[in-house]
Image: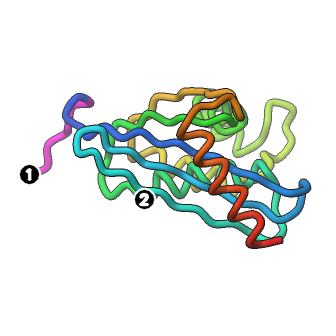
Amino acid sequence: MLRTLKMAELPLVKLYTDGACSGNPGPGGWAYILKHPGTGKVREDSGGEADTTNNKMELTAAIRGLAALKQPCRVELYSDSKYVLQGLSEWIKGWKARGWRTASKDPVKNVDLWQALDSEAARHTITFHWVAGHSGHPENERCDGLAVAAARRYA
């Protein structure tokens, strides 16, 4: 018999994400860092595309980071992208209720990525944290460096 885990019983992870693009559109990169405070384990990953946008790379970083978690977790999500954080914490509920349309009835941009992010996020309990980009935040700076390096590989 399955039992429902209480939030406090879920493992805590800290997820840091960033996306980068040289030109918009242009070659882009994404990166994430997963930290497991209980175990001290850290995982990093990055990748990119030859022709993309910054918003797509920001979304992809969050999708990939959440997808890397093998079980439901309490996720502290840190990003310098208000697009990702507000989209996931505020806007997405209305988009879904309107059939993936904005309040002005336009189709949601990057709907495939938003739907993938919504699916990954549904497995977890997420708390959102905005960090200012290029402000010396160690994990954000590391993610930025990984994403920029990935974008350069696709240039």
Mark 1–mark 2 Cα distance, whole angstroms, equals 26 Å
Label 2: which residue?
68
* Crowd band around label 2 with a 10 angstrom C-alpha radius: few (<14), some (14–19), many (20+): some
- Seen in the image, is 28 located left or right of residue 12? right
Q: Which residues are magenta?
A: 1-7
Percent position of residue 5, x then y? 20, 38
The total of numbered circles placed on residues is 2
Label 1: which residue?
1
- Seen in the image, is 53 located left or right of residue 119? right
Percent position of residue 106, x then y? 86, 42
Q: Secondary structure at mark 2?
A: loop
> Is residue 33 on the magenta stretch?
no
Residue type, numbered disc 1: Met
Residue at the spot 61% in from the left edge and 27% down from the top edge: 130
Percent position of residue 18, x then y? 64, 46
Q: Label the magenta part by its dominant secondary structure.
A: loop
Residue type, numbered disc 2: Ala
Q: Nearer the viewer, mark 1 or mark 2?
A: 2
Q: Nearer the viewer, residue 125 or 69?
A: 69
* Crowd band around label 1 with a 10 angstrom C-alpha radius: few (<14), some (14–19), many (20+): few
Residue at the spot 26% in from the left edge and 30% down from the top edge: 7
Q: Nearer the viewer, residue 69 or 6?
A: 69
* Among the 4 quarters of the image, the one containing residue 10: top left
